[in-house]
Image: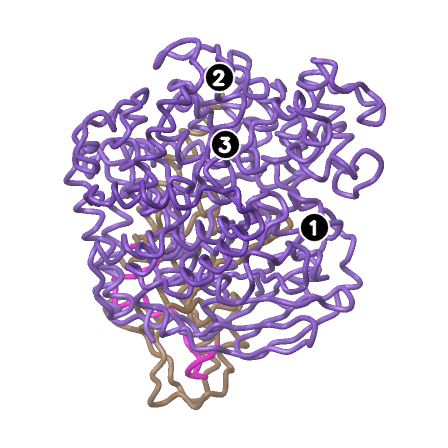
Chain colours: A purple, B brown
């Protein structure tokens, strides 16, 4: 096969055995990466019942057909698993570095790990040679030390490792690679920890065959040049240059302008006057150099070395979301503290976003008198108490003292503390949001609230509304209101979010990064840019794999992947009420300084929001309760998903006969005439 | 004046685009393991250093080759392996002071940079211009100019 290697590696840790499987039958309908992960997980396990730490749970690492090639930023790996952090139980996480390409060079598109090892183990993959090696000497050690040991032991390898946090099953433990990158969200580290799996160490020399090397090389070079060319499109070249020069911290003020940067645990938003040190992170006195993931011309990562003796640290730099979560949300303006916290997260294997949200929520509880110092072992969680945060990080990672309960994540701690406490937690489906305040942008609110893995922006960033590009809005949805950031137009916003959600499945399924994909994929200056994007993507796929895809086929792959996610979380009990914004969004105004949008931001209007939700559900072919209908799933060739879902729904309906299923189905059939989204 | 492949470590971000472009143009497969050049990643320092054939004036590989299989390309000055003569003894790999000659894991032959007949893919693809294909003189001048700019910034 070209582009992909066509092979899935199935590893059973309990039996210390492995089997290769042919993945070519999936190619045309799922491409690879995220979409393939979804169907494999759905087929392999009972997604309705398997709990995150059950040995039956699988963690699937998948790459796509463009991963590991010369295509710009083709270095992404997607992990999918039943997750411990969001209560929807769906775990999706994406990582850069060089681990994804290395996996493909070793000859594997996808690695599926199930079972549980008797003792700490790491899996060594060198082409066709798979070995289960003891990780007893690495267990308990930080990621940095382990990486150094392993890279010396297996020269030229790439490692994907968990830290002590994952070993101790902290619900928001991450998986790290390459010093600068991590599978951050959803708690994949804890799933690996529960399997006694320290990590994967991969070394490959088989390579990725390309169908038409000459044309593919020319096109990748052209694409790389175009991305950096201001004439190609002013907006994406601007954002490209910004990311390139200042990394993701560089966009802090830009996001602040449209009121989307949260401050003080989501109680304010916009531009924070004290954040100068945080905004100018890249290029500050501790900044050493820029770093890139595999094949990336953007190089948005940085290495920082803080020599202040109290806060000494050396690590890959924090990105936008980590800075906002640990800095802005906790009112901590000192860069050295944020760098120290981020470096600790990297070494211990923690997700800095959820950690920041834990701290900021604790601070709000402390201020409101919900908790006192005793709750956090004598550390007063006052706003901006950076030293206190540093003290708590190691406790959380080792689950010692108060760390044991904090390691459950803010949603579960809040639930235990009662209704009032839970109101302070800015979450969807149990997972807290990264640094994007969604009261300012209605479409973004919808996509965050709907996201199967819990609150985040990467399931579909409706950027058209951010930049108010009406021509693009009309091109995508047929309504100019879709470009208005404050509009509650039901169909316009539903179509906008639907389009971007399906579109966003693609980079994850192709194995490329959303940033450069974004710079010509979703920062559209003009409608014709979209045609350019499709032209590039379909050509690249053809030259790499030899298989022709049309844009509609690609969007169908996105739709299919999203429907599987939805069916899975519905089977785990997610319904309409879980797609409603959290308490803060619905009930609190959000004051702040920003030139765009009303100040203070009003809370989300639930009635109008629900109208968008209705419109969105019918676009997706879901019932009023948010359950995918058999007809829609069958239309996407997802018979087994439809069967499993139906069986589960019937089962739960027998348990709880009170649910008015029939009426909702009737209503749906009335609405079926609404046309599909234009692309 | 002959052009050379020159690199600036301070500009390298470690993206390895050069490696994969090299392997694709040379072998038709995206496979850094058979690339004619490497970017070495120092994990502990988060530092990346590109390593490549320096096309030495007094090439150790050419001098040591018992089959006299390495010759100088007249147009580019590149030291190129003639595979009709190569006996696969790997002496050149041992002799190279930069470790720039390696064995391709797929073909099992020694491989080295041939400057892509004067159109080196690595330099074309390098997104940060850390690799440049130019005359040493022009490159030195450019570097000197850049350093002066930096010094000027410091004194201001």
Dot 2: chain letter: A
Category of crowding for the residue at label 3, using alpha-carbon neighbours closer than 10 angstroms: few (below 14), some (14–19), many (at least 20): many
* Residue at figure coordinates x 24%, y 36% from the top left: A524
Label located before the other in sequence (3 or 1): 1
Q: What element carries label 3?
A: helix
Instruction: Verify CB contact (< 8 Å) between mark 3 and mark 1.
Output: no
Instruction: Verify CB contact (< 8 Å) between mark 2 and mark 1.
Output: no
Label located before the other in sequence (2 or 1): 1
Residue B115 magenta: yes
Instruction: Verify CB contact (< 8 Å) between mark 3 and mark 2.
Output: no
User: Which residue carries the number 1 mark?
Assistant: A166
User: Which residue carries the number 2 mark?
Assistant: A269
Q: Position of residue B134 (x, y in %)?
A: 30, 52
Q: Distance between the residues labelled 3 and 1?
A: 23 Å
Residue A141 magenta: no
Q: In the drawing, what numbered circle is on residue A320?
A: 3
């Amino acid at each position: 096969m070209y582009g992909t290697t066509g092979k899935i590696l199935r590893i059973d840790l309990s039996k210390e055995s492995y089997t290769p499987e042919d993945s070519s039958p999936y190619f045309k309908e799922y491409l690879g990466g995220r979409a393939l992960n979804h169907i494999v997980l759905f087929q392999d396990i009972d997604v309705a019942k398997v709990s995150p730490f059950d040995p039956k749970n699988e963690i699937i690492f998948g790459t796509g057909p463009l991963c590991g090639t010369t295509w710009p930023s083709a270095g992404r790996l997607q992990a999918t698993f039943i997750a411990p952090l969001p209560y929807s139980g769906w775990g999706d996480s994406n990582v850069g570095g060089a681990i994804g390409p290395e996996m493909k060079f070793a000859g594997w598109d996808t690695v599926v790990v199930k079972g549980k090892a008797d003792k700490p183990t790491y899996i060594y993959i060198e082409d066709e040679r798979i070995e289960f090696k003891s990780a007893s000497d690495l267990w308990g050690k930080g990621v940095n030390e382990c990486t150094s040991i392993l890279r010396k032991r297996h020269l030229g390898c790439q490692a994907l490792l968990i830290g002590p946090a994952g070993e101790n099953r902290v619900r928001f433990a991450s998986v790290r690679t390459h010093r600068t990158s991590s599978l951050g969200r959803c708690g994949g580290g804890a799933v690996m920890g529960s399997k006694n799996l320290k990590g994967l160490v991969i070394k490959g020399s088989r390579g990725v065959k390309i169908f038409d090397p000459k044309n593919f090389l020319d096109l990748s070079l052209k694409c790389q040049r175009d991305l950096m060319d201001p004439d190609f499109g002013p907006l994406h070249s601007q954002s490209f240059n910004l990311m390139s020069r200042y990394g993701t911290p560089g966009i802090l003020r830009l996001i602040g302008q449209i009121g989307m940067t949260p401050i003080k645990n989501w109680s304010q938003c916009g531009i924070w006057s004290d954040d100068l040190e945080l905004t100018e992170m890249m290029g500050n006195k501790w900044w050493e150099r820029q770093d890139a993931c595999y094949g990336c011309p953007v190089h948005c990562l940085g290495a920082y070395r803080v020599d202040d003796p109290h806060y000494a640290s050396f690590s890959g730099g924090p990105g936008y979301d980590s800075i906002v979560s640990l800095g802005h949300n906790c009112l901590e303006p000192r860069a050295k503290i944020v760098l120290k916290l981020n470096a600790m997260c990297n070494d211990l294997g923690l997700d800095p976003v959820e950690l920041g949200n834990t701290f900021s929520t604790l601070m709000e509880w402390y201020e409101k008198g919900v908790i006192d110092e005793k709750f956090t072992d004598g550390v007063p969680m006052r706003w901006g108490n950076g030293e206190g945060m540093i003290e708590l990080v190691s406790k959380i990672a080792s689950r010692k003292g108060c760390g044991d309960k904090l390691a459950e994540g803010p949603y579960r701690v809040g639930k235990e503390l009662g209704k009032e406490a839970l109101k302070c937690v800015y979450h969807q489906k149990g997972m807290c949001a990264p640094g994007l305040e969604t009261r300012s942008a209605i479409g973004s609110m919808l996509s965050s609230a709907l996201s199967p893995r819990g609150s985040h922006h990467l399931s579909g960033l409706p950027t058209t509304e951010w930049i108010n590009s009406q021509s693009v809005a009309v091109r995508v949805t047929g309504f100019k209101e879709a470009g208005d950031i404050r509009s509650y137009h039901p169909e316009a916003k539903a179509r906008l979010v639907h389009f971007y959600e399906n579109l966003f499945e693609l980079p994850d399924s192709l194995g490329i990064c959303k940033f450069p994909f974004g710079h010509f994929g979703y920062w559209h200056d003009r409608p014709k840019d979209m045609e350019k994007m499709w032209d590039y993507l379909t050509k690249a796929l053809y030259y790499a794999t030899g298989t022709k895809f049309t844009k509609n086929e690609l969007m169908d792959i996105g739709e299919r992947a999203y429907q599987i996610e939805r069916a899975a979380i519905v089977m785990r009990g997610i319904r309409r009420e879980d797609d409603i914004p959290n308490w803060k969004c619905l009930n609190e105004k959000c004051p702040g300084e920003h030139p765009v949008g009303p100040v203070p931001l009003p809370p989300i209007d639930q009635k109008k929001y629900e109208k968008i939700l209705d419109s969105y559900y019918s676009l997706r072919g879901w019932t009023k309760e948010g359950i995918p209908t058999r007809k829609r799933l069958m239309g996407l060739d997802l018979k087994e998903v439809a069967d499993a879902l139906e069986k589960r729904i019937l089962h739960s309906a027998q348990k709880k006969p009170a649910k008015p299923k029939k009426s909702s189905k009737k209503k749906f059939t009335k609405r079926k005439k609404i046309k599909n989204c234009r692309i | 004046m002959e052009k050379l492949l020159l690199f600036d470590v301070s500009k390298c971000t470690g993206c390895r685009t050069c490696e994969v472009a090299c392997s694709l143009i040379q072998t038709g497969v995206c496979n850094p393991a058979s690339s004619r050049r490497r970017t070495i990643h120092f994990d502990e320092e988060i530092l990346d250093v590109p390593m490549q054939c320096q096309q030495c004036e007094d090439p150790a590989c050419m001098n040591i080759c018992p089959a006299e299989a390495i010759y100088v390309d007249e147009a580019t000055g590149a030291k190129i392996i003639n595979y009709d003569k190569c006996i696969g003894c790997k002496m050149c790999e041992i002799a190279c002071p930069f470790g720039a000659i390696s064995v391709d894991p797929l073909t099992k032959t020694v491989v080295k940079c041939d400057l892509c007949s004067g159109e080196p893919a690595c330099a074309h693809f390098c997104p940060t211009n850390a690799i440049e294909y130019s005359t040493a003189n022009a490159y030195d001048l450019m570097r000197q100019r850049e350093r002066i700019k930096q010094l000027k910034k410091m004194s201001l």
